[in-house]
Image (tube, rainbow, N blue to C red):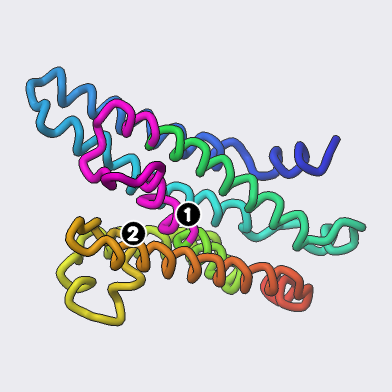
Amino acid sequence: MTALAFESRRLGWPALVAPLFAVLALCFFGLLSQVIGAPAQTDRVLSAIVQVGSMVGGIAAVSAVASDPAIELRLSLPRSVRRSVLLRLLLALLWSSAVIGFATELLHELGRLTSEIPDAPLADQLEWLPPLLLLAGVGALTAVATRAATAGAGVVAAAWVLSNLLSQLWSSVTWLTPLWIALPFDPADPARWYWNRITVALVGMACLAITAVLLGRPEHLLAAER
């Protein structure tokens, strides 16, 4: 069995099914709103795939780095724990990205997105990709630092909810705005949105890099199991 196949099995079906389930569930509710005579809500429900997908992908990343009950045995094997966990994390991120990216492009082609970025091919993918990197990075870092998957998942969910519900706070506090994952696109000031996407992505990648460093410290991994 190759390392890729082995880590795919260790990742587990929930992390692989979750992005698909989220997309299909929102498609079902979008269709339901159309059937019951509320077509105005259909596009809003379908467009939620872009936002919800980043949160689901973040939680999948947390699942990929969750504490291993056989950590002592894993540390004794030739393949490093860091390499194994990072491979699972990469699989979770690539699979989530493929599902969300395909759904976003399909909605774009069907004209169902409520927040399309004008005159910028594939820019709609920036609606979810930088937030996914940030939520995955913060969630994975929290899970590894605390050795508690629930803590990582909680941070991901809290960050997503606060970003989408407290828009006035994020927009009014200058130093918070660059990290606002739900910043709406403003045609009058597109540069602000693009800089936000860059900042969010860089912070997410920095968190993932710190996570990789912690995974390379056996004393940290063993201390958390005691």
* Magenta span includes 8: no
Answer left or right for 107 relative to 3: left
Q: CA distance from mark 1 to mark 2?
A: 10 Å
Which residue type does callout 2 highlight?
A: Trp
Q: How many marks?
A: 2
- Quadrant location, the N terminus: top right
Residue count near mark 1 (Cα–Cα under 10 Å), binned few <14, some 14–19, many ≥20: many
- Residue 174 in percent (x, y) is at 25, 81
Q: Which residue is mark 1?
A: 58
- Which residue appears at 33% of the width and 59% of the height? 160
- Which residue appears at 7% of the width and 21% of the height? 37
Res 75 seen here: yes
Name the N-terminal-most of marks 1 and 2. Answer: 1
Answer left or right for 57 relative to 3: left
The kind of secondary structure element at disc 1 is: helix
Write down the quadrant of residue 185 in the picture. Answer: bottom left
- Residue 108 in percent (x, y) is at 32, 33
Residue lying at the far left of the rendered structure: 37
- Quadrant location, the C terminus: bottom right
Write down the quadrant of residue 196 in the picture. Answer: bottom left
Q: Which residues are magenta?
A: 105-133
Q: Which residue is mark 2?
A: 160
Residue lying at the far top of the rendered structure: 35
Residues at circles 1 and 2 in contact by the CB criterion of under 8 Å: yes
Nearest the viewer among 32 and 129 is 129
Which residue type does callout 1 highlight?
A: Gly
Nearest the viewer among 14 and 87 is 87
Residue lying at the far front of the rendered structure: 119
Is 2 situated above or below 32? below
Give the number of the disc on residue 97: none
Answer left or right for 37 relative to 93: left
Nearest the viewer among 19 and 145 is 19
